[in-house]
Structure formats: structure tokens, C-alpha cells
Amino acid sequence: MFEQSKVTTEDQARYAGLIKSGNIEQALDEFISKYINPFVDEYSGKLAEFMQFVKDQEKSDTAAIIGIAAATIGISTLLKNNFALITTLYTKYLTKDIKSDEVKQRILDTALNRFNEQIDGTMNRTSQNVINAIRELQTAFITEEARLRASGLKGQDVQKGIESFKSQLKNKFPNIEEMIKNKSFLKSTADINGVSRNYRLEPYIEQSIRTSILDVDRISSEVNATIDGDLVMEYYKKDNRTVKTKERQICKSILAHKEFGLSLLALTEEVANLLGIMTVNQARNTSDYAMSYNCRHAVRRVSKSINDKIRGMLESQAA
Ligand SMILES: [Zn+2]
């Protein structure tokens, strides 16, 4: 399983070259379509096979459950390894202006840890969701068989009863049919009505990767700005791909407020109070969470003249 999942040295050099020449999006697009999506798709296909197997065999689910566990460990390891590789390339580029190797390493470690935690959580939820569905099926078969036997049926007649039960599975377990058919194995967290739905892994994993890379970019520019004593950063839309998700309220309100023609976030409390804006940390940590999952905004440095003007305002305020 997952053959040719290792990023070749040729491709590593290609991505490094693209990143270096500023074609960041292109490198990421190519990497995801070659080294992430096909394998997530292969994994989803495997899960569908295991579910189908249990549905067809109405026998022991042990083999399927062991198979699911093995496939899940395989895909998780693959995703983490490939992500670590591309993120190392990005971090090298995005932190090129940072002098301290220790700081560079910490930025890389933070990105990798966050991603790995997210992948572990996602894959755990996914495999558990599939295993639960398989157990649900298994229980249904056992119950049906017990019901048939209790009604006095024996041997072949029981088998016939089971066959007829199987043909009605679609109506009895629309959820399971849908999972297999659409390969939608990732269960969302329950909404306010307690309803959760299943969806496909690929877009979710892809978004996790893009968000994590974007985070390296955000953290690197924030560290750069802080080291140089900047007072504010510009909040802007970094990822211009069109996605279906709605923009966060917090992003809208930050973007709606302009100072010096820009939507700003402060790097100190003092400046935040002076300009009536949020600090970068506040934006990250206030409910609705700017720059978290699916948010396409980022922070970038502003000109020296804007920083100087604000410094002047601080001084005249103090005087
Ligand atoms: Zn946003």
C-alpha cells in the first residue's frame, strides 16, 4: 500500500526551486496533487473495501478492523513524513531573514507539531467512525440471525433470511451505504441539534496542509517584525483561492477598520489601545479565532514610515 509515496529527490529540488523563486502556491499545488491527494484517495478506497467486505461476508469483522488500523497507521505516517519534508523547504525560505537558527528551528517544530496533532486527531476520528459503522452492521447481522432462529427457522432458511436482510441494508443503514458510495469517512462534530455528517477526507487534509504552511508564513513574519521592533502588522488575504467556507466575523471586522489605509493588528497592547485595534495575539485568541483553520488571512510587515508615525503618536501621547 502507498507505493511511491516518498517525495523523490528530483521533486524536492523542483519544489525548493519554485519556492525560492516565489512560486509558493505552485509548489504547494504540485506537491499536494502528487504526494498527498492520491494516497488519501487510496486510503479512502481501502476503507470502502473493508466496509464492503463486512457487508458482503456478514462474518467476523476482526480482519477488517486490523486492516483499517494498519492502513490508518500507514497513511498517518505518510502524511506526517511528506508534510515535514515540504514544510522544511518552506520554513527555510520563509525564515531566511531570521538570524537565529534556534528561532528558525522553533518555528519549524511548532508547525510540525501542530500538523501532527491535527492529523492524529483526524485519522483517529476517521478510523473510529468506520469501525463503529462496521460494528453496527455486525450487530445487525447477529440480531437478525437470532431473530430468524427464534422464529423457528433452521439451516438454509436462516441463510435465506439473512440474504434478504442484506438486500434491505440500503434502507436500514442509509448512512453506511452513503459512506461506502461517497467514500465519506470523516465524521464532523455534532451541530447544535446533535447531528453530525460524514464527509470526504481529501479536502480536509488538503486544507490542513495549506493552513499549516500559511501558519509558518504568519509566524515567520510576526517573528521578523517583532525582532525589528515593529509596532503593527497588516492583516490581509493571503490565500486567494476561492473556497466555499464563509469568512469569519472577526476577520471581517479587522479588515473593515483602516488606519493609514491598511487593516492593522498591533504588536503591543499600548499600540492596540492607541489605535483602537486588536493585537495579533488577541486576534488569534478571541473566540472566532482569526488565522485558525480555514482562515485565509495572514499578517505581513508594514513600511518603516507607518511604524515611525505610530512611534511619534506614542511619544506625543506620553509627553
Ligand atoms: Zn480570516
Image: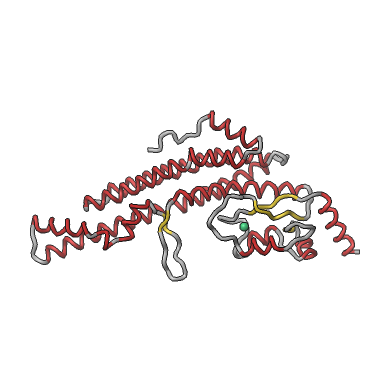
Res 161 → quadrant: bottom left
Farthest-out residue, right: 319
Res 162 → quadrant: bottom left
Report the residue at 58% width, 30% height from top: 13
Q: Position of residue 99 (x, y in %)?
A: 73, 39
Farthest-out residue, top: 10
Out of 191 and 72, give the one closest to the viewer.
191
Position of the N terminus, as image quadrant, is top left
Q: Position of residue 216 (x, y in %)?
A: 63, 46
Res 253 → quadrant: bottom right
| Residue 212 in the figure: left or right of residue 162 | right
| Residue 99, above or below 299 | above
Farthest-out residue, bottom: 193
Report the residue at 78% width, 62% height from top: 270
From this viewpoint, is residue 207 visible?
Answer: yes
From this viewpoint, is residue 125 visible?
Answer: no
Q: Position of residue 233 (x, y in %)?
A: 73, 54
| Residue 79 in the figure: left or right of residue 305 | left
Q: Position of residue 266 (x, y in %)?
A: 74, 58
Report the residue at 68% width, 41% height from top: 95
| Residue 93, above or below 181 | above
| Residue 90 in the figure: left or right of residue 206 | right
